[in-house]
């Protein structure tokens, strides 16, 4: 315990059970255990309503890149709300925070991306992607070029278009998704799907699934290929080194847009500003969110290449927009957040110091008898749980294995997430070496004691 609590936990948990239907949660389960109520945070640590300190190994939902407790961001939001709390940029209006943020993003993004469409979240960004790709081809006189190819087990959000672009079967089951015009190819998940060949050979094979799908559908019907640089929510699936070069070769043969979903990778997660820099990709569209504001206020966007913008500029009104597109306070906070990332050299530190240190220590967990593979890049990592290290045989009930390990960590003061039996971390980019040591020690203890 770090401080006496001012909260009545039992009351909050009861109100929560009675009234609050949570995202991605079995509501009934709240009745049994009750939620853990998080009340404040500082640096990389959360505190719950009973005063327990928890190391946030997930940076919230992969978003609190600059860490918690940044008073300067609160101050910027406060000042902006006093000056202009809300206005939009519909119908030929604009305001300084959104304009300045657009300019800053154009400076930071790959050189050929100079425009941004603002949204309120990553999901809205991917809804925008769906409409923008189809609008692009229709404006070019090819309205039938409207199919988007994505990947199994991808995550692109929870709205109807986002979940359809995503490749998560449990999400598709609810609500009759995916919507028409979206299909999915194999993911580059060597540990899960490719161990009968080398990672390099598997990377080529998984990439060639794109070529096969384009040929099956016909080039003149495919609008775009969408992918995360590495799959985040799917389990920190980092493609074999052969994958992206092969995808690039395939895309170069066809006239198809590349959409790189940077919602997790963007703003430093890999030790570069964007995953596209890390994997040497030249996207046509780049959805962004999360680290854009470090989660302090909701904001997202789609970065647009000059090639796409030139066509869209010929298409008249783009009949699309959100009330909170480029919200002034969110945009002001995002701009200040980007300045923190720059002025404190946070991304460079991940690339040169703390990222390599995390990866060295994380790899040590790969020696554990219950870990089949430890992988990572920059400031993310994944552990594949196995019941037999010799054969990499996985637990019969993968979801329970992962949940047990996750729950042990949480009780012991570490947020580590489970995607089935893959344990994942994505801490704030400002985590220090000694905090990384604490994270590793707690993860190891969970492996030692959970099973
Ligand atoms: N795209 C990716 C790659 C994501 O990881 C997420 C969220 O985790 C989204 C899109 C959706 O973003 P949001 O939850 O802000 O709608």
Image (cartoon, grey):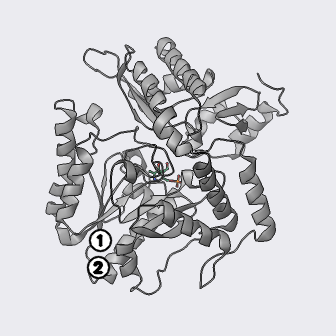
Mark 1 — residue? 146
Placement of the N terminus among the 4 image quadrants: top right
Classify mark 1: helix, strand or loop.
Answer: loop
Seen in the image, is 293 located left or right of residue 329? Answer: left
The correct choice, above or below, for 391 with respect to 136 in the image is above
Of residues 273 and 319, the one nearer the viewer is 273
Mark 2 — residue? 143
Q: Residues within 10 Å of mark 1 (few under 14, many from 20)?
A: many
Residue 193 percent location from the top left of the image: 25, 35
The correct choice, above or below, for 406 with respect to 379 in the image is above
Seen in the image, is 288 located left or right of residue 343? Answer: left
Give the residue at x 37% y 49%: 229
Classify mark 2: helix, strand or loop.
Answer: loop
Of residues 278 and 373, the one nearer the viewer is 278
Q: Are marks 1 and 2 in contact (CB under 8 Å)?
A: yes
The correct choice, above or below, for 438 with respect to 426 in the image is above
As measured in the structure, the alpha-carbon distance from the residue carrying label 1 to the one carrying label 2 is 7 Å
Residue 401 seen by the camera: no
């Amino acid at each position: 315990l770090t401080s006496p609590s001012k909260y009545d936990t039992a009351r909050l948990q009861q109100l929560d059970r009675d009234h609050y239907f949570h995202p991605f949660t079995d509501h009934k389960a709240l009745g049994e255990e009750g939620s853990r109520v998080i009340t404040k945070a500082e640096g990389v640590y959360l505190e719950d309503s009973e005063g327990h300190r928890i190391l946030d190994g997930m940076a919230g939902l992969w978003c609190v890149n600059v860490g918690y407790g940044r008073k300067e961001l609160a101050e910027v939001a406060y000042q902006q709300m006093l000056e202009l709390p809300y206005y939009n940029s519909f119908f030929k209006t604009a305001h300084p925070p959104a304009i300045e943020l657009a300019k800053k993003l154009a400076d930071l993004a790959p050189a050929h991306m100079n425009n941004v469409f603002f949204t309120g979240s990553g999901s809205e960004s991917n809804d925008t992607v769906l409409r923008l790709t189809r609008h692009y081809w229709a404006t070019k006189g090819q309205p039938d070029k409207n199919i988007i190819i994505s990947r199994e087990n991808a995550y692109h959000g929870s709205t109807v278009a986002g979940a359809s672009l995503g490749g998560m079967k449990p999400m598709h089951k609810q609500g009759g998704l995916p919507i028409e015009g979206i299909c999915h190819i194999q993911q580059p998940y060597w540990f899960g799907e490719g161990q009968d060949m080398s990672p390099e050979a598997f990377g080529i094979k998984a990439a060639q699934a794109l070529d096969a799908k384009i040929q099956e559908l016909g080039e003149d019907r495919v609008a775009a290929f969408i992918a995360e640089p590495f799959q985040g929510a799917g389990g920190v699936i980092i493609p074999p080194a052969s994958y992206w070069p092969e995808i690039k070769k395939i895309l170069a043969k066809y006239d198809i847009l590349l959409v790189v979903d940077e919602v997790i990778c963007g703003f430093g997660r890999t030790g570069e500003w964007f995953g596209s820099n890390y994997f040497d990709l030249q996207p046509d569209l780049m959805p962004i969110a999360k680290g854009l504001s470090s989660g302090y206020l909701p904001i997202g966007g789609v970065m647009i290449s000059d090639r796409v913008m030139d066509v869209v500029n010929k298409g008249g009104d783009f009949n699309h927009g959100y009330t909170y597109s480029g919200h002034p306070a969110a945009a002001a906070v995002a701009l200040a957040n980007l300045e923190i990332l720059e002025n404190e050299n946070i991304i460079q530190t991940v690339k040169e110091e703390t990222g390599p240190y995390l990866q060295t220590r994380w790899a040590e967990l790969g020696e554990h008898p219950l870990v089949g593979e430890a992988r990572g890049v920059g400031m993310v990592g994944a552990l594949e749980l196995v019941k037999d290290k010799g054969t990499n045989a996985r637990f019969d009930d993968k979801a329970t294995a992962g949940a047990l390990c996750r729950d042990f960590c949480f009780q012991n003061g570490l947020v580590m997430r489970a995607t089935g039996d893959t344990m994942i971390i994505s801490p704030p980019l400002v985590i220090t070496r000694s905090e990384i040591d604490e994270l590793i020690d707690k993860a190891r203890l969970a492996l030692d004691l959970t099973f």
